[in-house]
Image (tube, rainbow, N blue to C red):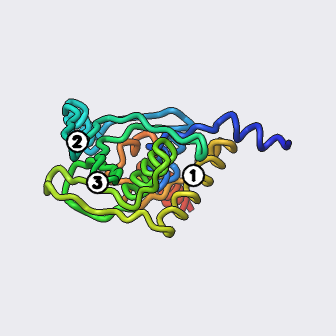
Amino acid sequence: MDNQYFKWQKISSIPISALQHYIYCPRQFALIHIEEIYEENVFTIQGNIVHKRVDNEKNYYNKDKKVENSLPLWSEKHGLYGVADTVEFEDDEIIPVEFKSGKKKNKLADDIQLAAQAICLEEMFSKEITFGYIYYDKSRKRREVVLDEKLRKKLDNTISFVRDLLIKRNTPKPVNDQRCNNCSLKDYCLPDLASRIEIYLKELK
Ligand code: SF4
């Protein structure tokens, strides 16, 4: 077997949160998961408060429905691990529910995170999962996410890209766009440094 296979094995377990960071910005993923830099800002703190609240919720059981909070997840097949905020077991369905701060919105990073949780649950319980929900704390609304082929393909691609970056240990260039305004790593990343240097060099001429 080639060297690449052994490298793949060495980093075979990827935290589900890494996929979400990669979708938001590949450089943010690399700063956190390769360079091990992490910093909080108002958005990460709001997210932590929502997750803490879910962590403190008691599990719930009755004869028709079971709700598990903070359920550990893993997939040997896909090399993933993480924690589901909430998983509902009802009418022979398994439904992952991810909690987010803020208002209801479509966001690919959240859908990928939910899909990754779903494929872990499928392996753990040997059961197909067809949908899940993202719950938005501020608007108190759920958004249904259908786990169709298109989303599963995007998830597979994301896992491959993330694994590849972890093997190569490359930190991509900054995106330097509106994503940087909400990013807690802005002060470490210096996303506009290259353009500032360019302007400075032009002024010297
Ligand atoms: S500041 Fe911008 S480029 Fe840098 S990690 Fe954050 S989102 Fe990515």
- The local crowd at label 2, few if under 14, some if 14 to 19, many if 20 or more residues have their Cα within 10 Å, is some
Q: Is mark 1 within 8 Å of ligand 1?
A: no
Q: Quadrant of residue 139?
A: bottom left
Q: Earlier in the sequence, mark 2 or mark 1?
A: 2
Q: State which mark lies toward you, 2 or 1.
A: 1
Q: Earlier in the sequence, mark 2 or mark 3?
A: 2
Query: Which image quarter is the C terminus in?
Result: bottom right
Between 99 and 119, the one lying in front of the other is: 119
The amino acid on which the numbered mark 1 sits, given as a three-letter code, is Ile
Q: Residue furthest front?
A: 63
Mark 2 and mark 1 in contact? Answer it, CB < 8 Å: no
Name the spot of residue 10 as percent of width and height, x first.
68, 33
Between 89 and 117, the one lying in front of the other is: 89
Q: Is residue 183 left or right of residue 18?
A: left
- The local crowd at label 1, few if under 14, some if 14 to 19, many if 20 or more residues have their Cα within 10 Å, is many
Report the residue marked by disc 2.
46
Q: State which mark lies toward you, 2 or 3.
A: 3
Report the residue marked by disc 3.
91
Q: Residue furthest left?
A: 139
Mark 1 and mark 3 in contact? Answer it, CB < 8 Å: no
Name the spot of residue 126 as percent of width and height, x first.
49, 47
Q: Is residue 139 above or below residue 79?
A: below
The amino acid on which the numbered mark 3 sits, given as a three-letter code, is Asp
Q: Secondary structure at mark 3?
A: loop
Marks 2 and 3, Cα distance to the nearest angstrom? 33 Å
Q: Is residue 194 left or right of residue 167?
A: left
Q: Residue at position x 31%, y 65% from top?
A: 106
Report the residue marked by disc 1.
159
Q: Say if residue 9 shows up in the picture.
A: yes
Q: Residue at position x 31%, y 44% from top?
A: 87
The amino acid on which the numbered mark 2 sits, given as a three-letter code, is Gln
